[in-house]
Amino acid sequence: MKQSKIIPMFSLLLLIPLSIVGCGETDNNLSSGKNIEEVESEIRNDLDNYITNVDFTLYVKSKNGNSFLHSTGNSSESVSYQSASTSKLVTSVVILSLVNDGVLSLEDSPQDYISSWPITGNLSAIKLKHLLSFTSGLSNAPACINFFGADFESCIDNIINVNADSTIPGDVFYYSPSHLQVAGLMAIKASKNTDWSSVFVQFQSETGLFLNSNYDLPSANNPRLAGGMHWTANDYLFFLDALYNKQILTDTLISQLSSDQISTASIGNSPALIALGEDWHYGYGVWIECKENPYNCTQVKKISSPGAYGAYPFIDFENGYYGILARQGELGTFQEGIKLFESVSQKLKNWALME
């Protein structure tokens, strides 16, 4: 059944496990008489005293309806930031909205929409669900994905060529931009649009989300769907709000998006494992954060889509809050954003439970 849409009310890296950078011990003082204003003041003080040379905005909201917004320096909730991999979740939801509307199916294959796609071999066995979970076997990315003047559709032929020896879909998880480029072209063709910008404009119009954001890197004509957005913290927070409160997508699709979709697939490339020492698994465009190492989580407690510049969007189901750390440091500093967030995460968890 088609889900009703909403309009918001207002518009690599150091190999250091997260366990040593401050998941935080329980602060018993926060549960012994302090009111929410006092807790927020402590969090602001911690953020202001955090040693970093990058301005940032932290914007979170709890299931109780409370919002917390704090910025440093020249950052604010309306500043436009380059997305890097934070766009993976957005792209996946945009595509899933077409699944939601019956325009696409997770069982569809690229050759159903792309005339040049092979109809034999491992490439022909790819389904949309494999592309969104990064298990399609497309481990190689051609340079055209990053070229300003490249043609989006023609670049898909290059993806085909550099992945001629791809693995069997579902067998290997490989963090790579090629998956979403192919899924994006499927979405363009299935929705009878001319380009990704038109698909995104349709999503903006139907949901009222990301009205101050766009896909423009390396160019609007050749957007990198796995990392080519500009967004504001305002826009991203209201997107997470709509997702958390199930106001976009069906319950089933949200459950699939936020569930482990790589299962027993081998790990071919995982920044979470390489840079964080964490054996997180993957849903559709999101990491399934799990403290069990190796992965052995039977219940999804938290999902996230961190970007290479240090921005960190998340939904914490266990503690009932969600938000975005907006930050644009050097390329390859995503761990720094996570470390910053973790420095106040325990106090935020306590804050999220307060009325």
Image (tube, grey):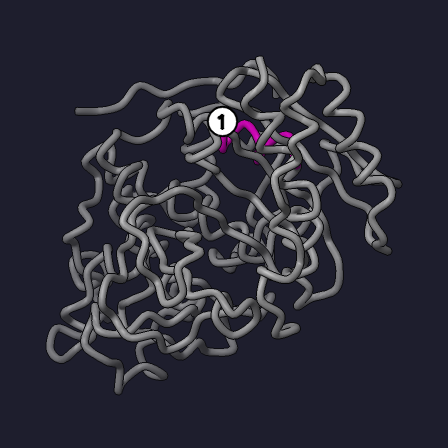
What x and y, as percent, mark residue 56? 77, 44
Q: Residue visible at 60% across and 48% down?
A: 312
Q: Residue visible at 39% across and 59% down?
A: 292
Q: Which residues are magenta?
A: 233-240
From the viewer's perspective, tell me whether residue 168 is left or right of residue 156.
Answer: left
From the viewer's perspective, tell me whether residue 173 is left or right of residue 49.
Answer: left
Q: Residue visible at 41% across and 54% down?
A: 290
Outermost residue toward the bottom? 165
Q: Residue visible at 36% across and 83% down?
A: 162
Rendered-image quadrant of the N terminus: top left
Within the magenta stretch, is there residue 26? Answer: no
What x and y, as percent, mark residue 258? 34, 44
What x and y, as percent, mark residue 34? 71, 18
Rendered-image quadrant of the C terminus: top right
What x and y, as percent, mark residue 151? 47, 65
Query: Who is closer to the viewer here, 187 or 17?
Result: 17
Query: Who is closer to the viewer here, 243 or 41?
Result: 41
Q: Is residue 268 above or below residue 204?
A: below
Q: Is residue 153 above or below residue 70?
A: below
Q: How many marks?
A: 1
Q: Main secondary structure of the magenta part?
A: helix
Residue type for callout 1: Asp
Disc 1 crowd rating (10 Å Cα; few below 14, some 14-19, many 20+) is: many
Q: Based on the displayed image, in which of its 4 quarters is residue 347 positioned?
A: top right
Q: Is residue 93 above or below residue 245?
A: below
Q: Is residue 97 above or below residue 13?
A: above
Q: Based on the displayed image, in which of its 4 quarters is residue 78 positioned?
A: top right
Outermost residue toward the left? 120
Q: Which residue is mark 1?
A: 241
Query: Who is closer to the viewer here, 89 or 220?
Result: 89
Q: Based on the displayed image, in which of its 4 quarters is residue 85 positioned?
A: bottom right
Where disc 1 sits, the SS reads: helix
